[in-house]
Image: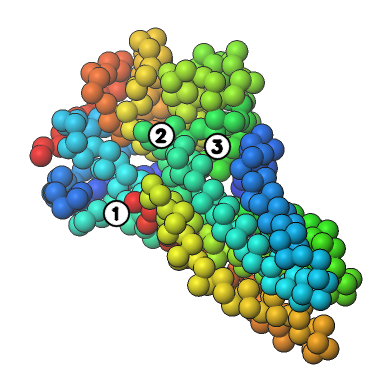
Amino acid sequence: MTNSSTHALKILLWRDFTLAARNKSEWMNPLLFFIFAAILFPLGIGPDTAILKQIAPGIIWIVALLAALLSLDTMFRADYDDGSLEQLTMSPYSFATLILGKVSIHWILTGLPLILLSPLLATFFHLDAASTLILMQTLLLGTPVLSLVGAIGSALTVGLKRGSMLISLLVLPLYVPVLIFGANAVSASSAGLDISGHLMLIGSLLVLALTLAPMATAAALRASIG
Amino acid sequence: MDLAITDTTSLKADRLTCVRSEIELFRDLSFELLPGQLVQIEGANGCGKTSLLRILCGLSRAAEGEVLWRNREIEHCRQEYYAEMAYVGHNNGLKANLTCEENLEVSALQNHLRDNVDFEQALEKMGLDELIDEFAGKLSAGQQRRLALTRLLLTDAPLWVLDEPFTALDHASRELMENIFDQHCQAGGMIILTTHHKMTIPHTEVKLLTINA
């Protein structure tokens, strides 16, 4: 059974990456928003290196969070509209596994590019290499949480005509802990403090989301369709 | 065709009651679907035909009563049930940005495909072989419907649940589908569908299930 679930997962990944390659605007938009927003801050605030350095982690984290939020509505929307979500809920394979696949695709298309782009943005804020590395570590642990928790909100609102407003209200409070520990880790480390606690806390949030979110999303999707 | 039919193969609806927006659509509806049978659900618009099919699929829940597959409640054996049934709903479930062949390939997410599955042959049977590399979004409504129904030819699932399968189909395609239904039932398969057409199926008796408001 697990073996065939892996096979189904492969088909799902192939399908969604093919679709993403043929419709680039959907996932490029949040990414461009992330880049532009992060570039505009140094321009608006001015060239004061000390201030920029200090606010950099917070700004990059907030922008990453908003970019994730912006893309959440699309996670299940297309599948819901064309009826393939209905078919997916009737799959003979583990539904939670397929959802984990959908979330991974969302993360690879929105979270991963942010992590790869963050060193570039860090230079705009004059962030040194050590802080950039820590920022990337927190993003690596934190952005999957954004996708996993966001999937629940996306699943709950996919049946509604204008669900995107509601998603923000549902999901933002749950994003706050990730934001606090993610952004604070960088400033704590530049103050010479040990940040392993920060990383472990985000890591534990990730484990928690990884275990619970797929099942919660599955239940929410069944409720949205029913 | 090699359907896995045993003597426990049956779909049973046990005293189903359906309520939509606080209006009761039907009450205490019971029936059993056995291998080789074809059931056509009849009734006026809005009487709950689609709601009944969605309950049978486990997509929505009945207000009361239960659906049994092989004498087990479907909620308790979802994966086993879904491995043995194929559903074509109102919505075709096609990806507009995938070609016909790719759409059939990804239908492996919904049904176990046969080992020696031949997409081209299946498309040829449905008269879509020339459109094999065309995007599904470019097809006409009738062609899309035919593509959605082609999925049925790729699996050994004994139970077919079809919501208005003839929508947008021309006369020839309708006859073709009736023949495919006939073959499926002759091989021991079972079909439950909604349609307003009067079906003429050579070797299979069409049982009517009428929903009264």
Name the N-terminal-most of marks 3 and 2: 2
- The chosen color scheme is rainbow
Nearer the N terminus, badge 2 or badge 1? 1
B68 vs A164, left or right, is left
Callout 2 and callout 1 share a chain: yes
Residue name at image x 55 percent, y 66 percent: A149
Residue B104's x, y, as percent? 57, 31
Q: On the image, numbered disc 2 is attached to which residue?
A: B91
- Disc on the earlier residue, 3 or 1: 1
- Secondary element under disc 2, as helix, strand or loop, is loop
Q: Nearer the viewer, residue B122 or A138?
A: A138
Q: Which residue is mark 3?
A: B107
Q: Please give the chain letter of the residue carrying mark 2.
A: B
Mark 3 residue type:
Ser
Residue B61 tag number: 1
Tell which subunit mark 3 falls on.
B
Dot 3 crowding, Cα within 10 Å, few <14, some 14–19, many 20+ = many
Q: CA distance from mark 3 to mark 1?
A: 25 Å
Q: Which residue is at 50% across, 43% downward?
A: A79
Q: Is residue B28 visible?
A: yes
Using a 10 Å C-alpha cutoff, classify the residue at mark 1 as few (fewer than 14 neighbours), some (14 to 19) or many (20 or more): many
* Residue A149 to residue B171: above or below: below
How crowded pointer 2 is (Cα within 10 Å; few <14, some 14-19, many 20+) is rated as some
